[in-house]
Amino acid sequence: MKVVNNTPKFITVEGGEGVGKTTQLRLIETRLQALNIPLLVTREPGGTPLGEQLRALLLQKDGLAPTAMAELLMVFAARAQHVSTVIVPALERGEWVLCDRFTDASFAYQGFGRGISLEVIAQLADIVHPTTKPDLTILLDVDPEIGLQRARARGELDRFEREAAPFFEAVRAGYLSQVEREPDRWRVINAGADLENVQRQLDALLNEWIAGATS
């Protein structure tokens, strides 16, 4: 595939626990690099020294857990630093950005999962990144029970992974609600299938989307 129009794109990958984001992010990275697309790969929360410190606080299993609102504000503090010092500069340099989670995760986890007003989250998004929005968001969708089984099989669980099943069911509902609201931006992958099947789905998706985005 020949890239004709290399206008920088912002791609995000979303999903609940145990969906295999790390593995699929590597596949996407490999595909884009094979096309000689300049690429920055990053993650949220994180992506900067400050963001990684906040990530550690958010995921730590011990100590006093932040309230739902404190959790949301910590995520957006990390995001504010990330957008202004990493994501936007990369796009301005002409690089594509591939990010493990972005603001859609806040709507799913802190909105649907924690019960914080979606309007409040939208207001924070407008403050932190009013003009920065993903061109493509890939949802790795799996039944929460299967995802949690996979997460437990990986080893010790972080603070989010220790939540009860209803929390993850609400998170999944939050993601699917966003897909319904913005179907042109979202692509859904059945991440409950075996790895080979998931990667076939993802490969087909990328072939179609990259062709349209770069023609």
Image (cartoon, rainbow, N blue to C red):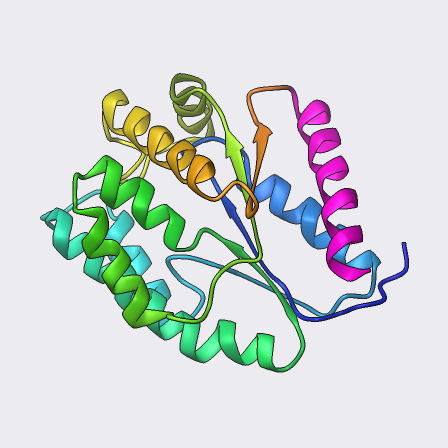
Q: Residue at x 25, y 48 (%)?
A: 60
| Relative side of 97 to 86, left or right | right
**Which residue is painted at 71% across and 39% down in the image?**
205
Q: Is residue 49 above or below residue 196?
A: below
Query: Main SS of the magenta segment?
Result: helix
At x 44% / y 24%, what residue is drawn?
147
State the residue lying farthest toward the right. Answer: 2
- In the rendered image of this protein, does residue 109 appear above or below residue 81? above
Query: Picture quarter containing residue 166?
Result: top left
Which quadrant is the C terminus positioned in? bottom right
Horizontal side, residue 160 vs residue 86: left or right: left
- The spot of residue 163 in percent (x, y) is 24, 30
Q: Nearer the viewer, residue 17 or 73?
A: 73
Residue closer to the observer: 91 or 22: 91
41 relative position to 68: left or right:
right
| Viewport quadrant of the N terminus | bottom right
The image shows residue 169 at horizontal and vertical percentages of 31, 24
Compare residues 175 and 180 and report the one nearer the observer. Answer: 180
Which stretch is magenta? 194-215
Residue 86: % across, % down: 49, 75
Residue lying at 46% horizontally and 37% vertically, measured from the top left: 179
24 is higher (above) or lower (below) than 81:
above
Q: Is residue 213 magenta?
A: yes
Q: Position of residue 122 (x, y in %)?
A: 28, 57
**Total numbered labels placed on residues in the image:** 0
Hey, which quadrant is residue 98 in on the image? bottom right
User: Is 98 left, or right, of 75 in this rendering?
Assistant: right
Query: Can residue 200 be found in the magenta stretch?
Result: yes
